[in-house]
Image (tube, grey):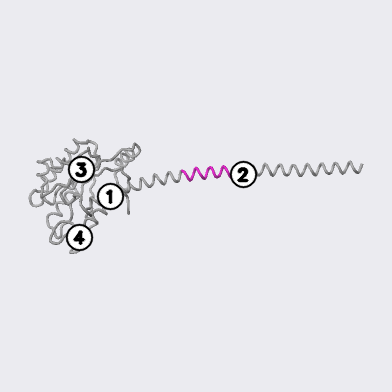
Amino acid sequence: MRAFMTLIVLICIGTIVYGNYHWNSKLGSAVDGKVVDVHKNSTATATEVVDNNKEAVVKGSFTNLPESLVETLNEKSENKETINLAIIGSEVNGFHDNSWTTIFKEEMESAYDGLFNITVNAIQGKVTTSDVVQGDLHLENLNAKPDVVLLEPFLLDSNGLIIIDHSLQNISFIIEDLKAENPDFFLFIQPGQPIHNAVYYPEDVEALKTWTEENGYTYLDHWSSWPDYQSDVLLDYMNPDSIIPNEKGHEVWAEYMVNYFTGKE
């Protein structure tokens, strides 16, 4: 009888031990399962964050740009298509060592890895808005239909020769010609370089800014990055006895344009 009771006790102990082991195993599996689930959720969340960050980077790059242009840029990028960006203006915009257009092109290529195909039509010599329109000079060197145009509309060379109202009308003609090339192109208008102690030219530039905004175009006010045109400090940004920017002047101009188009601070 004693042996029988001992056997019963051993069986009970064994059952308890086994049950406890089995319970712990199930609990451990359940915990492991939860850990796996948490890791999966964490991974998914991290991926979403990464994706969102990528999207934010892209949107951050386009922070300053019109929303409709951003949509076009994203669509072109997704389709691996190129954006044709044309810079049209006076000869100060020409490609050469350390010019703002050269710096701008290099920075844009670095920032967007080939998304933009940038060309420059810098019309040589002293040309007024009327000269440009009459000779269709703004349409030269447009090897591809432009999706985006940065227009510097020859106000400096027109100053004193063409009244601002006529220049603004000529600018309208230039825009209409560009629309004929691509009705859906995006237009940005910028002034030429500031001139030290100029009198009437700044008034024309202010009129251009007002006209640009009233007509729903985007005005790129790079003058805000230069020293005041009435300050002698501006002379440090110009070639001696000249109205042409030196390397320092081109760097200021380029910095504004690069910051605008890449979203840099």
The quadrant of the image that shows the N terminus is top right
Observer-side mark, 4 or 1, equals 1
Q: Quadrant of the C terminus?
A: bottom left
Q: Earlier in the sequence, mark 2 or mark 1?
A: 2
Mark 2–mark 3 distance (CA, rounded to whole Å): 64 Å
Q: Which quadrant would residue 37 be assigned to in this image?
A: top right
Q: Which residue is mark 4?
A: 237
The kind of secondary structure element at disc 3 is: loop
Which residue type carries mark 2?
A: Asp
Q: Residue at x 20, y 43 (%)?
A: 215
Question: Which range of residues does the magenta coloring cover?
Answer: 33-47
Three-letter residue code for mark 1:
Glu
Label 4 – label 1 distance at C-alpha: 21 Å
Q: Earlier in the sequence, mark 4 or mark 1?
A: 1
Q: Percent position (x, y) of residue 198?
A: 13, 58
Q: Secondary structure at mark 4?
A: helix
For mark 3, does the 10 Å Cα neighbourhood hold few (<14), some (14 to 19), or many (20 or more) residues? few
Residue 51 lies within the magenta run: no
Numbered disc in front, either 3 or 1: 1
Q: Looking at the picture, does residue 253 appear above or below residue 129? A: below
Residue at the farthest right position: 1
Image-based side of 219 in relation to 63, left or right? left
Front disc: 2 or 1: 1
Residue 215 circle label: 3
Mark number displayed over residue 32: 2
**Which one is nearer the viewer's eye here, 9 or 163?**
9
